[in-house]
Image (cartoon, grey):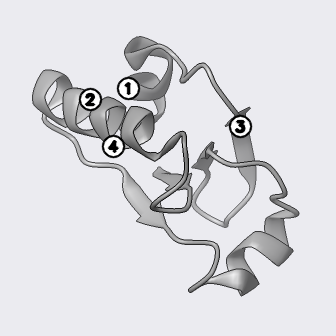
Amino acid sequence: MRVVCVFREGRDYSRTVTDWLEDFRRRTGHEIEIIDPDKDSNFCETYDIMEHPTIMALGPSGEVNTIWKGLPMPLFDEVAYYVNA
């Protein structure tokens, strides 16, 4: 399963997101793919992502299994379930 985090660097929420991603990596041993909406606008258009940060769990054929939008960030266990699936 593919788990991605869509957010922009240099925003007021960026530090919160980068800290969350680093803590997630340390606690679970898994990294979440980061997508910059300015560099990959096709991804954002495809999935109609308008709010940042957004974390998405995508199935093997690209279908959205679940999505978390905005702050606060989701619990590690919620996201880890999809990373380990």
Camera-near label (1 vs 2) is 2
Which residue is more in the foreground, 30 or 18? 18
Q: Is residue 20 left or right of residue 72?
A: left
Other-residue count near label 2 (Cα within 10 Å), few / some / many at <14 / 14–19 / ≥20: some
Of circles 4 and 2, the one toward us is: 4
Q: Earlier in the sequence, mark 4 or mark 2?
A: 4
- Helix, strand or loop status at disc 1: helix
Residue hosting label 2: 24
x and y percentages locating residue 18 in the rendered image? 33, 43
CB atoms of marks 1 and 2 within 8 Å? yes
For the residue labelled by badge 3, is the local secondary structure a helix, a strand or a loop? strand
Q: Quadrant of residue 55?
A: top right
Mark toward the start of the polypeptide (1 vs 2):
2
Q: Image height check: is 72 above or below 6?
A: above
| 59 up-or-down from 61: above or below | above
Residue 67: image tag: 3
Q: Secondary structure at mark 4?
A: helix
